[in-house]
Image (cartoon, rainbow, N blue to C red):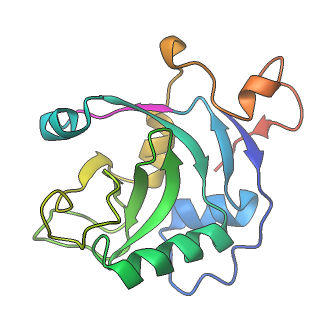
Amino acid sequence: MKIIPKNADATALPFALPADYAGFMARYGGGWVFPNHVRITDPEFVDITGYDIAAVQYFLDPERLMNDLNTARETNSYPDWFIPVAAIHTGDVVLMALTADPAMNAPNGSIWIWPRNMDLEWGDEANNRIFPIAASFSALLNGFYFEEDEGMPPPWRRMASPDDAPAIDLIL
C-alpha cells in the first residue's frame, strides 16, 4: 500500500484516538492512499446510495478533521461520538467511533460511512443512518483494493505509477 502523506501535526487533536489511527496520524498526518477502494456490504446502504464500492479520496489532516467535526456538531449532522476521518469520492464521509455505543453496535475505533446530508439534523428523515465498513482503522486499510472501473483518484492520476514520488510505502 502507498500513501502521499500530508505530514501534518496531529498531536493537538483534543481526544484520544485508537492506537492504529493514532499511529497513522502521527506518522502521516492524513493523506492519499492507494489502493483506496472498499466494498460496502450493507444492502440498505446500497439501496439508499445506489453503489456498493466506495473510493476513499483522502484521509483528513488534523485541521480539516477538526473543521469538519465542528461543522457537524454545530449542525447536529451525525452522533457526537463519531469523528470524520476520510472523504469518499461521492461526497459521503468515513467516520470513526470514539466511544463504544451498544445501541448502534459501534465498538470504539470501528469505521462507518455516512451518506452525507448536512441539511438535516441527525435523526431527521434521510439523515438517520450510518453504515459499518470495518471493525478498525487497520481493518479498513487491509480491506482496500484497486477497482479498475473506478480509475485512480487524484492525485494518483497525475503520476505515472503509484510507486513514483511523492508516494511512499504505508507502514502502520
Q: Nearer the viewer, residue 83 or 117?
A: 117
| Residue 31: image location, x then y, percent | 69, 50
Residue shown at the point (54%, 21%) measured from the top left? 146
Residue 119 is a magenta residue = no
- Main SS of the magenta segment? strand
Q: Is residue 162 visible?
A: no
Q: Is residue 18 visible?
A: yes
As displayed, is residue 53 above or below residue 103? above
As displayed, is residue 169 above or below residue 159? below
Q: Residues in magenta?
A: 37-41
| Residue 25: image location, x then y, percent | 65, 63
Residue shown at the point (22%, 71%) measured from the top left? 122
The N terminus: image quadrant: top right
Q: Nearer the viewer, residue 61 or 71?
A: 71
Residue 50, quarter of the rendered image: top left
| Residue 73: image location, x then y, percent | 39, 81
Which residue reaches farthest right? Answer: 165
Which residue reaches farthest top? Answer: 148
Which residue reaches farthest bottom? Answer: 14
Residue 38 is a magenta residue = yes
As displayed, is residue 124 above or below residue 36? below
